Image (cartoon, rainbow, N blue to C red):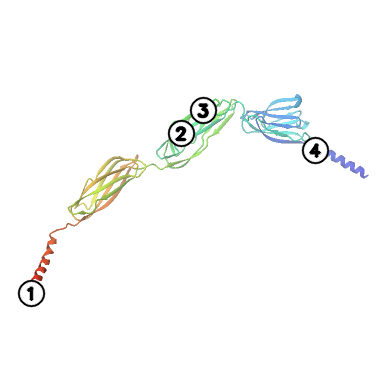
Amino acid sequence: MKLVYLAIFLLLVLCAHAQNDDETIFDEFTLNIGDRIEIGNYRILFIEVQSEKDGLAILGVSKPGGTLDEQRVMLVNNANTFDGGAEEGGLTITVEEIFDDQTAKVRVEHKENMGTARKRVSEGPKIAKNVPNLIVKKNLDKGRLTVGEDVKVTVTVKNIGTGTASSIQLEDLPPLSEFTFLAGYPPKIKDKLEPEESDSAIYVMTAVNDGSVKVPSIQVKYKDSKENQKSNNSAPFDLIIDPKSKPQLNIEMVPSGPLPAGGQGLLNISIANIGRASATKIKIESDIEPSVGFEAIGLDKTFFEIPPGKIESYSAQLIGKNSGNYTIILRAAYSSSEESMLSEMQTEIVVLEREYKYLYLLLIIPIMAIAVWILKRYREYKY
């Protein structure tokens, strides 16, 4: 009786195993052009993407001995059966997704008893024939600029692929708020580029606001020979716009020293531009406080231009009429490219009191009187 039960148990195990072998399973693979899948006696070859836009890919399915050798255009998410499909012991193949003109995701359904599906990577080149590939670059002729400066932008597009690119369009939007666009914007290039051919466009813009600017990427759109829409972007980059360059005049006055009343001296004056732009139409004007008792000749001057880092020097004659402290104030009015500016500096001049030499004679009188008195007393005591 035990042998009967054992035989029944073994029969049930064999039936269950047979049912498992008869189950339909699936595998998914990401394939590049030239890659293949091997399952049982079947060979599945990924030939090309016929149309990215329409979701069409071409796969070849074959068996040794020529019993099956077929190339078929497959639509994305549409199952294709071979030898009756997976339910009948053949294959069911579905292109699930097309990533680009060289890559797709493929699902293979088959009976479990066929074994394990394996991917074989192609050893040949991965680039499909007659496929364009445009690269786009955007360059500025200055890495850093200031408000008011112009910058030249060069956009270059090159076809590094193996096919002709057509219907080429550049999208360089939106315009940057930190700039005004002068000429050549938006950039335009050829409508068609052959392999290894390139084209460039140039436009000019002016910086109007300072700060750190994120220059966005520029996109190029184009089509291949099968009217598939493609695109590529340039790399974004950062740009620094400094505040507008301005002149800054620094006035320095060095007097020759204190003046005696009625005497003369010199005042050496230096006007230095310590800014980053030229100062123009410079007019030097002076005030003296108090205005009576002191005179300066040659304080007021005009200069057409003082470039950045340059100095203009001159001297004025000082005449001290009355003793006292006098303040000389110099004001330099000048212009930058778009505004008027003013610098001011002052210095103090001391005029000493007048010395009268006859006062020294008054000291001789008491000295002589003392000397006469001493001499008289000497004579009295001598006798």
Label 2, on which residue?
153
Label 4, on which residue?
20
Judged from this view, the residue extending furthest toward the front is 382
Q: Determine whether the residue tagged by mark 4 lies in a helix, strand or loop.
A: helix
Which residue does the image show at 54% across and 31% down from the upper left?
Answer: 135
Label 1, on which residue?
382
Quadrant that contains the C terminus:
bottom left
x and y percent of residue 150 in the render? 41, 36
Tell me the kind of residue under disc 1: Lys
Q: Earlier in the sequence, mark 1 or mark 4?
A: 4
Tell me the kind of residue under disc 4: Asn
Mark in the foreground, 2 or 1: 1
Discs 2, 1 touching: Cβ within 8 Å: no
Q: Earlier in the sequence, mark 2 or mark 4?
A: 4
Mark in the foreground, 4 or 3: 3
Discs 4, 3 touching: Cβ within 8 Å: no
Q: How far separated are the C-alphas under marks 1 and 4? A: 164 Å
Label 3, on which residue?
198
